[in-house]
Amino acid sequence: PEPGDVALECVTWVAGDAGDSALLEKLAAEADAFVHSVGLLLDAESGLGGLNFITSGSRSVPGDGATYDSVMRSTALALLSAVQATAKGTERPFCFVSANEAGWPEATQAALEPNLPEFVGRYLAAK
């Protein structure tokens, strides 16, 4: 986002570990809506994780052992758990953002998987 963007003034930006349940619960207790947009293009198991430095807008590189499942699916479930634990009887919106199969509207995962590198199948399954 651009500095001073009026549409984003009400958003609280926090740097931290998206798998840290204590941090997530602390933040969830104070929030009225949630967006999970954690992603990883190339995980450590693909052998191509270092290329994230080039392909990632944030220039991030996955840590040792970072998998699609641990970075994307598990962190989404951890956030959802924190939201539920702090709900106090109120409903709050939860949005999961994913680019899974974006641009492939007619393709199904079952049709694509036999023709994809192994790591892409794991990416799609985690999403």
Image (cartoon, rainbow, N blue to C red):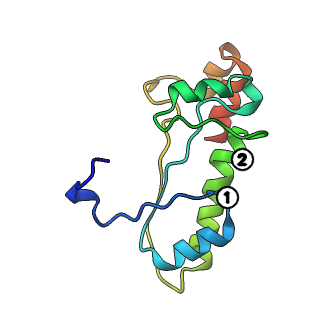
- Locate residue 47, reporting x and y percent: 74, 23
Q: Please tell me which residue lies in front, 112 or 88.
A: 88
Between the C-alphas of marks 1 and 2, the distance is: 8 Å
> Closest to the observer: 57 or 82?
57
**Helix, strand or loop for disc 2:** helix
Q: Which mark is residue 79?
A: none
Residue placed at 23% from the left, 56% from the top? 4
Residue 77: percent from left, percent from top: 65, 58
Percent position of residue 106, x then y = 46, 23
Mark 1 or 2 closer to N-term? 1
Q: Residue at x 65, y 62 (%)?
A: 78
Residue 61 visible somewhere in the drawing: yes
Density class for disc 1 (Cα within 10 Å; few <14, some 14-19, many ≥20) is some
Q: Secondary structure at mark 1?
A: loop
Q: Nearer the viewer, residue 98 or 22?
A: 22
Tag 1 and tag 2, C-beta contact below 8 Å: yes
Q: Which residue is mark 1?
A: 19
Relative to 106, say whether 34 is above or below.
below
Quadrant in the picture for residue 93: bottom left
Give the side of residue 105 with respect to residue 4, left or right.
right
Q: Is residue 9 left or right of residue 31?
A: left
The residue singled out by tag 2 in the image is 70
Dot 2 amino acid type: Ser
Residue 126 placed where, x, y %? 66, 40
